[in-house]
Image (cartoon, rainbow, N blue to C red):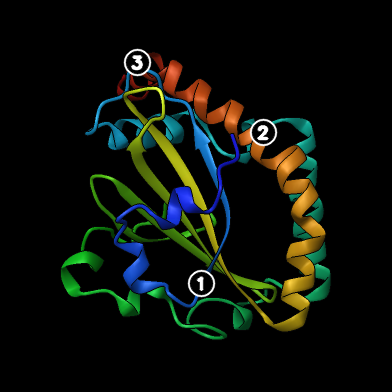
Amino acid sequence: MRLPRAAHTRQAWRIHAFAPDFRTEDVWAFRTPGAGPGDLDVMLAAMRAAGGVARQSPANRALFAVRRKLGALLGWDRPEAGLGTRVRSLRERLPPELAATVDTAEPDGLPLTPVYRLQDEYVRELANGTVHTLMHLGWAPARDGGHELRMAVLVKPNGRFGRSYLKLIAPFRYLIVYPALTRQWERAWRDRRLLLADGAS
């Protein structure tokens, strides 16, 4: 479910102190009925066990495949357009104790690099020729009781081209990407006991 930007900006997240120059682009909520205040780790583990893009809808997989081909053709994803080259990692702004909450040296197969992880926040980042983006996963009180996962996408576009690119892909995010992600992540929460039991065996 799409939420207003204030659903993210009014929360007392640590991210606000480190990313004031990023714009809140999208805020989305994922229902997790029965979740308690300490269940973010359970949700993240269930999401990993449920798989990534490979287990999403055919339309979503097709969109990501087209984006990868365009990125390769136009040079958007070349190393010199990414973190540590075109832009500095957000991790450079963190205090040492917060940076130590994740291990970036251990590959996890995901395209976004971990920034930090707390009991109620998890942040990853990605940079390419179009944008420097942060994915903030927050664990917040749900509107109908309990807790829910909220995803905020924070962006710093790469000039006029980056701003135009974000406007161009907005309909695909709202009509295809986020609804598919909602189905996958909410199903992961519902099936968490089975998924995590299979992962432990």
Q: What residue is shown with label 3?
A: 193
Q: Indicate the amino acid at tag 1.
A: Phe
Q: CA distance from mark 3 to mark 2?
A: 23 Å
Secondary structure at numbered mark 1: loop
Q: Indicate the amino acid at tag 2.
A: Pro
Q: Indicate the amino acid at tag 3.
A: Arg
Q: What residue is shown with label 1?
A: 22
Q: Nearer the viewer, mark 3 or mark 2?
A: 2
Q: Nearer the viewer, mark 2 or mark 1?
A: 1
Image: 14 above or below 158 = above
Q: What residue is shown with label 2?
A: 179
Disc 2 crowd rating (10 Å Cα; few below 14, some 14-19, many 20+) is some
Q: CA distance from mark 3 to mark 1?
A: 36 Å
Q: Is residue 104 visible?
A: no
Image: 82 above or below 13 = below
Dot 2 or dot 1: first in sequence order is 1
